[in-house]
Amino acid sequence: MSHNRSGLLTGLALGLIAALVAAAALGAAVLFQNRLPTGVTAFGNGHPLSLVSSLLVALLVALGAGAARPRALTLIPVSALYAGAAMAAGQVLGSSIMIGASLRTPPDGPDPAALPDVTVSDITWDNFTAGLPYAPNLYRDPIAETWAAWLYLAVAALAALLLVTLRVLGVRRAHRRGTEPEGDGREEAEYRAPFEPAQPPTQQPTTDLFAPRKPARD
């Protein structure tokens, strides 16, 4: 099939796997962000760290999608969707478990300003389902409050779009160079010296001097 030859199906599958891995890794980073030094998490209100996370997600998705040397242009927008979805899924996943863990202590509902330190034992399905109704507020609240989450999602999608575009265009150029003939398809003209006729004169058969000649016709 042409899709197989263009690397589209393989690129879609590998890109999806990379997006799932990136979402899981981002969710773990959200859960254990309190383990990082305060100077790192507090620098720039945490925006630089989140932007770096967006670029890492985009890079992981681009590496997965481009591993099959794809030539299909369809893979470019799909990879951007993969990266944006991985960014959103990772944030929602980590926030859900963190909020679900915090619901066990305060009686009045989750308090994002006082989320507890999460341990590996807190990563449970019950905590995920308990905090899931609250986590999508990262994107459902007014844009004045959720602009940062949307910014990180857009950065991941645009970075993946650019990286996969460069990869696909590079593979297409290499494919064209490999399929072009080395010459121009025309045989090189035979060299002739100046004033040399294009075709050599026909050779007349040598006759014997003693052979009888044909009589001339009147």
Image (spheres, rainbow, N blue to C red):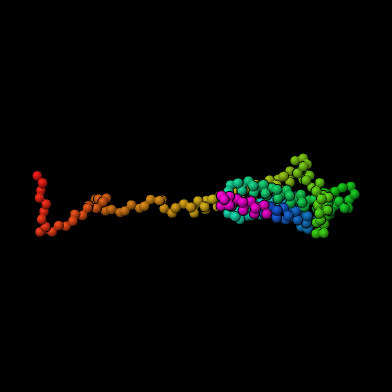
Q: Name the residue located 70 percent from the left edge and 55 percent from the top edge.
A: 21
Q: Where is residue 33 drawn, in percent x and y?
A: 77, 55
Q: Where is residue 62 drawn, in percent x and y?
A: 63, 52
Quadrant (top left, top right, bottom left, bottom right) of the C terminus: top left
Magenta stretch contains residue 39: no
Q: Is residue 193 rendered to the left or right of residue 25?
A: left
Q: Where is residue 99 drawn, in percent x and y?
A: 82, 51
Q: Is residue 83 rendered to the left or right of residue 132?
A: left
Q: Name the residue located 76 percent from the left edge and 49 percent from the top edge.
A: 92
* Majority secondary structure in the magenta region: helix
Counting labels gives 0
Q: Residue furthest right?
A: 107
From where the camera sits, is residue 39 visible? no
Start and end of the magenta stretch?
1-17
Magenta stretch contains residue 16: yes
Q: Name the residue located 11 percent from the left edge and 54 percent from the top edge.
A: 213
Q: Where is residue 198 drawn, in percent x and y?
A: 27, 50
Q: Name the residue located 90 percent from the left edge and 49 percent from the top edge.
A: 107
From where the camera sits, is residue 202 visible? yes
